[in-house]
Image: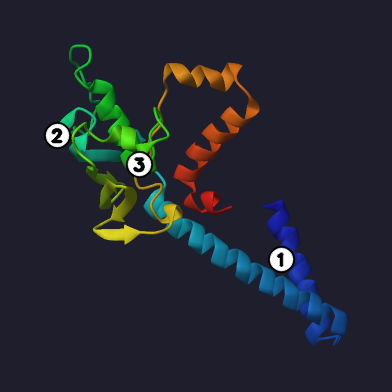
């Protein structure tokens, strides 16, 4: 409040100098201050728009983001799988080697277009096939989007049935974070491991970050 009060007093003084005392220097100072305020206002409106769509909001005391469904075709050990999820906590149970981690990995791939287990997409394709598809329906705040990863020699990414060419236009629609035994390298490993991890998470919150 004190800073705002001082700001308005300075602004009033500049107006007095310009229109009463005809001070030229005050006019230029006032002009550039006005331009600065307009730019700051535009940035604020833009950030508010971006945050309203992409940032997670609180609903009933918790963040609201729901992966409604996920469909896997020729992915790892799943030839054709369709799962629906609850708005609440979802627990995947089953015997060893049935593909529980593969489901978690597919969600990660759907969100970030890459796996946390392999750097080669061909390893995600079920044996005997040459392509895989991951498709999901996501509700975030009041927006629902259909996400799709289609791999066949090349990887194509789709948002609401439209092909996406820029990764920054796709990220942040589904926010994920994974913790696996390999992530102990965040503590014990080299700094570039930590930088890569932070870059991934920040890009989900602020897609424009990955452009830089």
Q: Is residue 203 left or right of residue 18?
A: left
Do labels 2 and 1 touch, CB within 8 Å? Answer: no
Residue tagged by mark 3? 111
Of residue 62 and residue 187, the one placed in the foreground of this image is 187
Tell which tag, 2 or 1, sits nearer the viewer.
Answer: 2
Tell which tag, 2 or 3, sits nearer the viewer.
Answer: 2
Q: In percent of the image, x 76 and y 79: which residue is there?
A: 15
Q: Position of residue 87 (x, y in %)?
A: 22, 34
Of the image marks 1 and 3, the number of the one nearer the N terminus:
1
Residue tagged by mark 1? 8
The relative height of residue 41 versus residue 203 in the rendered view (above or below) is below
Q: Position of residue 69 (x, y in %)?
A: 18, 39
Q: Position of residue 32 (x, y in %)?
A: 74, 74
Question: Could you say whether the residue bearing mark 2 is in a helix, strand or loop?
Answer: strand
**Rendered image: mark on residue 138:** none
User: CA gap, disc 2 to disc 1?
Assistant: 67 Å
Q: In percent of the image, x 55 and y 35: which residue is there?
A: 196
Residue tagged by mark 2? 79
Of residue 177 and residue 134, the one placed in the foreground of this image is 134
Q: Is residue 183 left or right of residue 190?
A: left
The quadrant where residue 91 appears:
top left
The relative height of residue 2 versus residue 115 in the rendered view (above or below) is below
Do labels 1 and 3 touch, CB within 8 Å? Answer: no
Tell which tag, 1 or 3, sits nearer the viewer.
Answer: 3
Within 10 Å of disc 1 (Cα), the crowding (few <14, some 14-19, many 20+) is few
User: CA gap, disc 1 to disc 3?
Assistant: 46 Å
Within 10 Å of disc 3 (Cα), the crowding (few <14, some 14-19, many 20+) is many
Of the image marks 2 and 3, the number of the one nearer the N terminus:
2
Of the image marks 2 and 1, the number of the one nearer the N terminus:
1
Within 10 Å of disc 2 (Cα), the crowding (few <14, some 14-19, many 20+) is some
């Amino acid at each position: 409040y004190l800073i705002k009060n001082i700001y308005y007093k300075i602004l009033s003084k500049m107006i007095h100098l310009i229109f009463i005392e005809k001070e030229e220097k005050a006019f230029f100072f006032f002009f550039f201050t006005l331009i600065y305020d307009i730019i700051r206002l535009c940035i604020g409106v833009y950030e508010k728009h971006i945050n309203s769509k992409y940032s997670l909001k609180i609903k009933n005391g918790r963040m609201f983001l729901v992966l409604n469904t996920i469909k896997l075709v020729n992915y790892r050990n799943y030839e054709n799988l369709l799962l629906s999820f609850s708005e609440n906590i979802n627990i995947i149970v089953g015997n060893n080697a049935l593909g529980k981690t593969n489901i978690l990995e597919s969600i990660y791939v759907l969100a970030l277009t890459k796996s946390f287990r392999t750097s080669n997409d061909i390893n995600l394709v079920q044996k005997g096939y040459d392509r895989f598809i991951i498709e999901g329906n996501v509700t975030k705040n009041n927006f629902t989007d259909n996400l799709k990863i289609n791999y066949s020699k090349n990887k194509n990414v789709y948002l609401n049935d439209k092909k996406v060419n820029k990764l920054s236009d796709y990220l942040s629609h589904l926010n994920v974070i994974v913790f696996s035994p390999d992530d102990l390298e965040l503590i014990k490993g080299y700094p570039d491991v930590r930088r890569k991890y932070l870059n991934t998470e920040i890009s989900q919150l602020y897609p424009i970050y990955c452009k830089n």
